Image (spheres, rainbow, N blue to C red):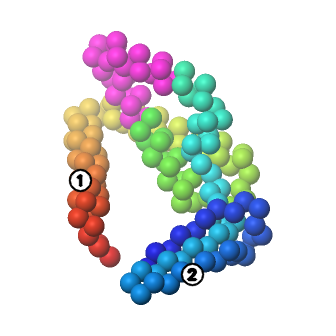
Amino acid sequence: MSVTMLCDPKGAPGQITNVIDSSDACNLKFTASSYEACPFFSITNLFEQYKYFFSLAFIAVGIFICFLGEKLFHIVLFLLTALAVAFVILMFVTQVAFAKGNQKNAYWIVLAIACLAGITAGYFIVKYEQFSFAIVGGSLGGVLGLTLSSLIISHFQLSVF
């Protein structure tokens, strides 16, 4: 069975329109469009709206890390940890916790909280440098494991659930 929800920004909230049910003996496909299928926040739209700011910020951070990374190891470790933690918090909160209809001010509050959490995490990573390598290694190992398992599952088309 295949279920597909399409975004209909002009549709009425709470209503499913254009339901298409094409039954096949071996493959059932269900396609519907609704207002609720539209994303309420898109990181792509945020990057597109502020593309010049993010471009300059990423270029500046990249040049800083490229030329001064080894000499200023603690600063680079702090910056990368702060950015990674803030990014993870932003992704989690915007995709899971926000309900539709929140005002734009809520996103700026979450951005401020994510930045504060990133700065705090960066401070503790630099302060306890001996544990930072274990944390970074464990995190990268987890990401590598998830990536490999996703590739294996998608390559062999295994059904996990």
65 magenta-colored: yes
Q: Which residue is mark 1?
A: 148
Q: Where, by quadrant of the figure, is residue 18 drawn?
A: bottom right
**Residue 146 image offset from top left, x and y in percent:** 28, 55
Q: Is residue 146 left or right of residue 89?
A: left
Q: Which residue is mark 2?
A: 21
- How much space separates mark 2 and mark 1, taking CA atoms? 35 Å
User: Identity of the amino acid at label 1?
Assistant: Leu
Q: Quick one: 154 or 43, which is closer to the camera? A: 154
- Magenta: predominant secondary structure element? helix
**Residue 7 image offset from top left, x and y in percent:** 64, 62
Circle 2: element type: strand
- Residues rendered magenta in the picture: 57-82
Q: Quick one: 87 or 155, which is closer to the camera? A: 155
Relative to 38, does residue 67 appear above or below in the rendering?
Answer: above
**Residue 16 image offset from top left, x and y in percent:** 68, 75
